[in-house]
Amino acid sequence: MADSLPFDPNAAADLSSGVFGLPFTRDQAAVIIIPVPYEATVSYGGGTEAGPEAVRVASAQVDLLDRRFGEAWHAGLFMEDADPRFCEWGRAARKLAQPIIEQGGATPDDAPTVAEIDAICASVNDLVRERAAAALAAGKVPCLLGGEHAVSLGAIHACAQAHGQIGILQIDAHMDLRDAFEGFRYSHASVMHNALREIPGVTRLVQVGIRDFSKGETDYAASQADRVFTHYDDDLFDAQARGESFATSCARIVSQLPDKVYLTFDIDGLDPALCPNTGTPVPGGLGFREASLLLHTLAKSGKQIVGCDLVEVAPGEDSDEWDANVGARILFRLCMAAIISQGHYPRPPRAPAPDPHGVPGSERSAAKRWPRATATRAVTPAPYPLSRPRRERAGERASLLLLLQRSTPPTTQHPRLRATSPGAGVRAQRSEAMATRSRNPRHHTRALPPLPHPAGEGRGEGFFSPPSPTLNP
């Protein structure tokens, strides 16, 4: 395939050719990346206006073959030049907003300044909407690269106008449902509230990874219960702790979305180890593999990604490009997920996963019922299914029997033991039972009377749990 391309995808990337070193033109590309280096209302850390250029540079380090998404980049990715007005407006608005942010929010006396900031933000939204609409009109998928999260609003407007009813999949640490946070109507912390309020075409908002929010935001989400579905980070963790696979969680998340989806990815939705310089990092979050699996699940679901964005990437100081490196890889997967969902590139077949127990197909049901026994291949499971409590009791008795066989003195010593050792009578009784029935070892477990439990009459925390329920004495 490389021979038919105008460049060698196995060679080092040449960024003079384009983002990720891809030489596609705008007309050839299925996805148009629109850089929006704008930052005005960030309320903690900053630096997102440098995000788009840092991600573009870091994209040279991304290899083009992906095991989940194949080579969907063949459909074409193209990154536009950044409009200089975004930086100019951002710096002007930031200069006005900074004193208000530092004092904890706007007061009535700040109304003229807030109005000026809101007017600048509205101009940004209009320009983003215009550029996203141009991409949509050409049959492309617009992909914003921010910049603070507030810039997403214009692209969501354009997608809803072009496609009618859409849903939003938001990967984020924050709900972003505050009403005019710190007095700014178009605050980065208010973008999803604005989308729900201003865009009737947004019929569903599905949030993933949320772990930092206010009471007002949860109340607003509850008031929009037919439109807002929030998957809190704690709930996702708890589901996995109970044994649910993350793939199942992804399928449930995607099932809540309508057929046409706008995907907004705030980099702080990831574990902050992957984005330490983002403006508002929060402990917890998705790992890189989990985020990739969620994108892949959406891409193969049959739903269409009609637009997307990656926001809040902030490169570190002293040439620290780690945030940009991770951001470039997320951007690459965002674009390829959009391409696959649009049908521009077939989803590559994936090799079947190896059986985790290394057991042939005919024995897989046994591997599920007795995973530890089958993995070690110690014994052949019983031909009849046992309930879990009976299986546990049988394993406990068999293991205790083995311990008694190894530790109990000969039966000739039982009278002495009965007289000198607490609990020796129980051991003697069991040794006698074993000696009597030694010719028929299959009945050993049936010959044993109940043992007292070390933690009391019930099974407390001190009860001995055998390493394997399948030992043959």
Image (tube, rainbow, N blue to C red):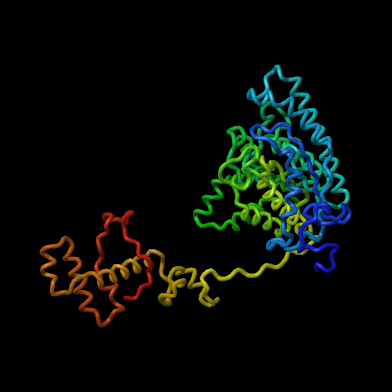
What quarter of the picture does the N terminus occupy?
A: bottom right
Residue 338: x and y, percent?
Answer: 76, 54
* Side (left or right) of 153 relative to 5: left
Q: How many marks?
A: 0
- Given residues 297 and 47, the one toward you in this image is 47
Asked which quadrant contains residue 127, the reply is: top right
Residue nearest the observer in this picture, 417 or 287: 287
Residue 242 percent location from the top left of the image: 49, 54
Residue 285 at what x, y percent from top left? 59, 46
> Which residue is more in the foreground, 137 or 98?
98
Q: Residue at x 80, y 28 (%)?
A: 119
Which residue sits furthest front?
318
- Residue at 70% across, 68% down: 349
Task: Please state the horizontal and vertical placement of residue 420, each as a whole percent of the image.
Answer: 11, 63
Q: Is residue 76 left or right of residue 472?
A: right
Q: Quadrant of residue 66?
A: bottom right
Outermost residue to the top: 109
Quarter of the figure that contains the C terminus: bottom left
Image side of residue 382 versus residue 264, left or right:
left
